[in-house]
Image (cartoon, rainbow, N blue to C red):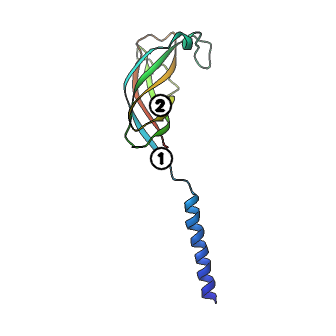
Amino acid sequence: MAVWQRLRGLLVVGLVVVLSGLWMPLALALTPIELSDLSYEDCPPSLGDGAVVSGSMQSANCFIVTGKAKNTSGKPVVNADIFGRIYDANNNNVMPNRTRLGAIDEVPPGVSEFELQIMVPASQPLPLQLKQFKASGFTG
């Protein structure tokens, strides 16, 4: 009798382990996205008029950064955070306290285009230099 109770107990524990494994979400890992062919242009007047730098009343220039995003995972990547450095004509970091510049809602498999709006203090001399841009997100 004691043997059957032990076996039944082990069976119950085994079923709980197996069934709980079915309910657990899959582990998600960040998927890197390669960003290339970067360029920027002035924002349309409707976006850039009256722009100020975040956290201050300093006037700002609005730019749209464009480029290509390469997703080699074979699956769509969602909420891909964009990281990078932006320097002015004098090699001064335009956003010294920020490396996360924005996000791409969804990056399909393969190569696709993306754009990102940024605000740069009007006192920073042009042209801008876009360096070390990359993105990462979760497969969806």
> Image point 52% across, 27% down: which residue?
98
In the rendered image, residue 80, in percent from the top left (x then y), is placed at: 48, 35
> Image point 60% across, 72% down: which residue?
13
Left or right of 115, for residue 3? right
Left or right of 93, for residue 3? right
Q: From the viewer's perspective, is residue 46 above or below residue 37?
A: above
Left or right of 1, for residue 81? left
Local crowd at mark 2 within 10 Å, few (<14), some, or many (≥20)?
A: some
* Element type at mark 2: strand
* Element type at mark 1: loop
Q: From the viewer's perspective, is residue 8 above or below residue 23?
A: below
The residue wearing badge 1 is 29
Q: CA distance from mark 1 to mark 2?
A: 16 Å
In the rendered image, residue 30, in percent from the top left (x then y), is placed at: 47, 43
The answer to which of 38 and 78 lies nearer the viewer is 78
> Image point 62% across, 19% down: which residue?
55
Q: From the viewer's perspective, is residue 88 above or below residue 36?
A: above
In the rendered image, residue 75, in percent from the top left (x then y), is placed at: 43, 43
Task: Look at label 2 and name its amino acid.
Answer: Ile
> Image point 40% across, 17% down: which residue?
91
The answer to which of 7 and 85 lies nearer the viewer is 7
Quadrant assignment, res 89: top left
The answer to which of 105 and 58 lies nearer the viewer is 105
The residue wearing badge 2 is 82
First-in-chain label (1 vs 2)? 1
Quadrant assignment, res 132: top left
**Which mark is on residue 74?**
none
Residue furthest left as drawn:
37
Task: Look at label 1 and name its amino acid.
Answer: Ala
Local crowd at mark 1 within 10 Å, few (<14), some, or many (≥20)?
A: few
